[in-house]
Image: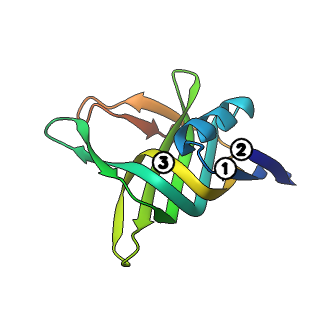
Amino acid sequence: MHYQLIHQGDTRTWAVVLDTGEEANACLLAFAKEQHLSAAHFTAIGAFERAVLGYFDWNSKDYKRNAVDEQVEVVSLIGDVALEGGEPKLHMHAVLGQSDGRALGGHLLEGRVRPTLEVIVTQSPAHLRRRHDPASGLALIHLDKELP
């Protein structure tokens, strides 16, 4: 993984590039920890040699794992960083394009890069925090202020 700070002001923005063989979740989480990110969002494009997409099953309160065991284009990857228990946590969704033009989508659980993943990470000025939601069993972003 290589990165460069490309903007610094009220917020910071980085270009982060992952190389063949790197795992997207692990690299982006390591980056978030290294930069002490408490709130950020990111977008990415590139390709994976294989991936695992998740679909959240409301009844089981767990992710169904859907393996993608082929080379795919990362048509779109979007996500955020928020704190959970004082540590950065990632939440990512991806749309993956197959060779015949079909698309697969879901929560990105795993993504092995080949040949590259180009990510733009922008730090948010406000701190985002996750709290356990008893109804879903997930840690969801909680905002301190609510609109009337």
Find residue 129 and name its label.
none
Image position of 71 (left or right of 42) = left
Most extreme residue toward the top, as rendered?
Answer: 85
Q: Report helix, strand or loop for mark 1.
A: strand
Residue identifier under label 2:
1
Task: Please rate how many residues cluster around mark 1, counting C-alpha atoms within 10 Å: few if below 14, some from 14 to 19, many from 20.
Answer: many
Residue at left 47%, top 49%? 92
Which of disc 2 and disc 3 is earlier in sequence? 2
Residue contact at pointers 1 and 3, CB within 8 angstroms:
no
* Front in this rendered view, residue 66 or 42: 66
Up/down of 37 relative to 96, above or below: above
Query: Dot 3 lies on which element?
Result: strand
* C-beta proximity under 8 Å, tags 3 and 2: no
Image location (x, y in percent) of residue 118: 66, 59
Q: Which residue is label 1 attached to?
A: 18
Coordinates of residue 104 in the picture (x, y in percent): 34, 64
Question: Disc number at residue 111?
Answer: 3
Lower position in the chain sequence, tag 2 or tag 1:
2
- State left or right for residue 24 relative to residue 120: left
